[in-house]
Image (cartoon, helix red, strand yellow):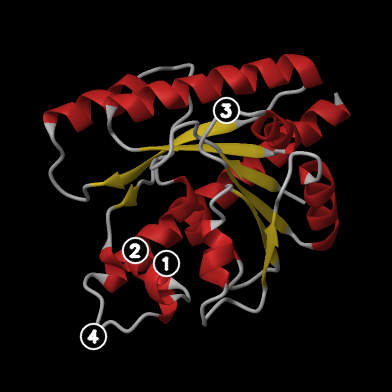
Amino acid sequence: MPVIAFANSKGGSGKTTSALLLACALAETRATTIIDADPRHPISTWAEKPGKPDALTIVTNTSEKTILDEIEEAAARDPFVIIDLEGTASRLMSYAISQADLVIIPLKEQQQDALAALDVIQEIHRDMKATRRQIPYAVLFTQSRAAVKSRTARHIAAQFRENPKIDVFDAEIHERDAYAAIFSIGGTVTGLDPKKVNGLPNAIGNIDAFKDEVIERLRAIRKAADKQEVA
């Protein structure tokens, strides 16, 4: 079953938020496991609050020694496995990337995030050589403005979107109150009270667009793999 790793060697890139939003969206229809491999364990902390979907399993990783077994067990059990990796380059990150069917590289439209994303892309290519297989990956812009972007944000986005060697999600995870709210009170975005959270319909639409594009990419990856097997 598909294994999706969220990786960026810089903290604060929107990695954990994006991973949790996708996991909750997938868990609405299919059993999903999210492996919390961030040393701060923010998703495990979120799961202690009320409102976690019944179809979502949280696995709290404690060591690079266990990550491969955790991925294997989760993939054998559930249709989707998501890994929220730590915000630093590490052997654990490399192990997880080597097992991924898709690596999502979240970054804000800031220069430090962009440089960290390029570091992750280089790591992925090293892992490709080590494992002798293609590891699909794509950049995801996070905490972006839904409307007018700054000149700096447009410049950084263009550096990635106009680079033919780097795949980039069409969808972006915008900066929304709803996304911060679930870490504060628990539950999912769809379970929030629209009277208490601003812009909830737009936040849900944003997540759905991201989820749909992830599924489309996974299907394309599977189709390409099937063609290679036939050839």
Seen at 58% across and 73% down, the residue is 28
Q: CA distance from mark 1 to mark 3?
A: 25 Å
Question: Residue 91 sits in which quadrant?
Answer: top right
Residue type of the residue flagged with mark 4:
Lys
Residue for badge 4: 195
Seen at 78% across and 31% down, the residue is 227
Q: CA distance from mark 3 to mark 2?
A: 25 Å
Residue for badge 2: 180
Q: Position of residue 37 (x, y in %)?
A: 63, 48
Upstream in the sequence, badge 3 or badge 2? 3
Residue for badge 1: 183
In the rendered view, tell whether residue 123 sits above or below residue 82: above
What is the crowding at mark 1: few (fewer than 14 residues within 10 Å), some, or many (at least 20)? some
Q: Position of residue 5 (x, y in %)?
A: 62, 42
Residue for badge 3: 89
Residue type of the residue flagged with mark 1:
Phe
